[in-house]
């Protein structure tokens, strides 16, 4: 089935898509030939193509006049990408989002509150449009303070909240004595939803609410949904994507079940495709049958890390999700920042911690002890005054290289 879809995609892109036509010159007859003859696509290549052919690049399959949607990446790692979609490719992504909603138990008539600023980031708009197409009451929360959003969330009796894990924590800080009607919080934009410590924190802050993770990218569209029976396990929507797992350093295909980098080809977004796109996401595939009955690729722990975020500290691979898990499990932390420095080729990491309460004398000691037990490293931890560290509405940027 994937081979037939990939061959159909190839025919749809030739010869109109100038970026991919040379890459698809070989008429592959098997998945092995596809991997052998079709090169990877990287974000750096797309950025370079867009800079060389402004303003939108050459990877579009149709005339620009056919495109009706403009979005832009969040540019957390370099220049932002401007992305266009036709009504058909936008509809394809809304279909992907509908799978996410269905796995979360969302039905027509459900009231969904979107705690987003509604800038040019694709995920907000596709989630909102997909909700309306399903027959849900979609409630926008753009241009509001956290207090105003909370008030609207309560007054509208919304049952589902869509936001980043970080903002779900922040919104709970504004609601110490409020009791929203929420049944489900769908989180994305950060790995936190599948990090056990962060999920536990969200469940404590929003008692009785189900936390549902998923992930996607502007370049690919919505990619995964959370397993209905296993917390922190994401299923790739293989109806819509062809997924590969490769060595993050060499790009070599890995055996089934090996941890590596996720590579994606979107099978139906033909007007704005990516083929063999190196996402930079490190994942752990599960080869065992899933209790939910799905045969789609399962990722244990969701997105474990970004390839570029991993640092080696005294011979130990350290990922942001591992640090966050210890911090959230420890408790008592309102916000934090990890600072990475390199001096004479030696990389070190330290933490700045903002406590939930002014009296937290043993917090640094408990955190250093927890990090040492989890990672085998001593990581210096400094307690800073409440309100010192920035708060985030969209993707949190806590991993800072100095």
Image (spheres, grey):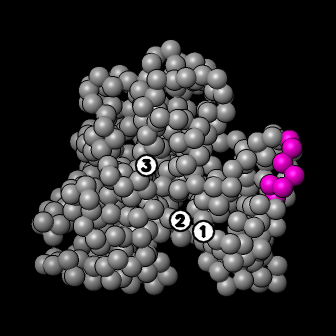
Q: CA distance from mark 2 to mark 3?
A: 15 Å
- The verdict on residue 363 being magenta is yes
Magenta residues, dominant SS class: loop
Q: Position of residue 147 (x, y in %)?
A: 64, 23
Q: Earlier in the sequence, mark 2 or mark 3?
A: 3
Residue 308 seen anywhere in this rendered image of the structure? yes
The C terminus: image quadrant: bottom right
Q: Is residue 312 left or right of residue 300?
A: right
Q: CA distance from mark 2 to mark 1?
A: 6 Å
**Disc assigned to residue 305:** 2
- The verdict on residue 237 being magenta is no
Q: Nearer the viewer, mark 2 or mark 3?
A: 3
Residue 221 seen anywhere in this rendered image of the structure? no
Q: Residue at x 64, y 37 (%)?
A: 170
Q: Position of residue 146 (x, y in %)?
A: 63, 27
Q: Are marks 2 and 1 in contact (CB under 8 Å)?
A: yes
Other-residue count near label 3 (Cα within 10 Å), few / some / many at <14 / 14–19 / ≥20: many
Q: Residue at x 31, y 59 (%)?
A: 236
Q: Are marks 1 and 3 in contact (CB under 8 Å)?
A: no
Question: What range is drawn magenta here?
Answer: 358-364
Q: Is residue 165 left or right of residue 300?
A: right
Instruction: State the residue position of label 1.
Output: 319
Q: Is residue 83 left or right of residue 398?
A: left
Q: Earlier in the sequence, mark 1 or mark 3?
A: 3
Secondary structure category for the residue under label 3: strand
Secondary structure category for the residue under label 2: strand
Q: Position of residue 127 (x, y in %)?
A: 38, 37
Q: Earlier in the sequence, mark 2 or mark 1?
A: 2
Other-residue count near label 2 (Cα within 10 Å), few / some / many at <14 / 14–19 / ≥20: many
């Amino acid at each position: 089935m994937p081979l037939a879809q990939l061959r159909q995609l190839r025919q749809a892109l030739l010869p109109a898509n100038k970026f991919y036509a040379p890459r698809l010159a070989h008429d592959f007859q098997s998945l092995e030939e596809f991997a052998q003859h079709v090169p990877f696509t990287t974000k750096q290549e797309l950025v370079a193509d867009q800079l060389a052919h402004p303003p939108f690049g050459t990877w579009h399959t149709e005339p620009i006049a056919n495109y009706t949607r403009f979005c832009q990446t969040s540019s957390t790692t370099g220049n932002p990408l401007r992305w266009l979609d036709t009504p058909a490719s936008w509809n394809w992504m809304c279909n992907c989002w509908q799978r996410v909603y269905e796995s979360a138990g969302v039905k027509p008539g459900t009231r969904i509150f979107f705690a987003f600023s509604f800038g040019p980031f694709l995920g907000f708009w596709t989630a909102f449009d997909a909700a309306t197409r399903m027959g849900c009451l979609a409630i926008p929360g753009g241009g509001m303070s956290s207090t105003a959003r909370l008030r609207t969330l309560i007054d509208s009796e919304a049952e589902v909240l869509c936001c980043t894990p970080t903002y779900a924590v922040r919104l709970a800080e504004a609601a110490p004595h409020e009791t929203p009607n929420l049944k489900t919080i769908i989180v994305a934009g950060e790995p936190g939803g599948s990090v056990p410590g962060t999920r536990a924190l969200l469940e404590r802050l929003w008692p009785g609410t189900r936390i549902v993770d998923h992930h996607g990218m502007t370049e690919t569209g919505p990619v995964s949904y959370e397993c209905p029976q296993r917390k922190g396990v994401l299923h790739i929507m293989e109806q819509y994507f062809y997924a590969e797992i490769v060595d993050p350093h060499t790009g070599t295909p890995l055996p089934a079940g090996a941890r590596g980098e996720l590579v994606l080809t979107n099978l139906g977004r033909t007007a704005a495709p990516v083929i063999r796109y190196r996402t930079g996401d490190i994942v752990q595939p599960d080869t065992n049958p899933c209790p939910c009955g799905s045969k789609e690729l399962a990722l244990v722990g969701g997105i474990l890390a970004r390839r570029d975020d991993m640092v080696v500290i005294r011979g130990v691979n350290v990922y942001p999700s591992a640090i966050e898990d210890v911090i959230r499990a420890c408790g008592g932390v309102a916000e934090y920042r990890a600072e990475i420095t390199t001096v004479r080729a030696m990389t070190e990491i330290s933490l700045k911690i903002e406590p939930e309460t002014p009296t937290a004398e043993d917090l640094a000691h408990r955190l250093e002890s927890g990090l040492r037990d989890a990672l085998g490293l001593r990581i210096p931890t400094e307690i800073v005054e409440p309100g010192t560290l920035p708060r985030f509405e969209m993707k949190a940027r806590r991993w800072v290289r100095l």
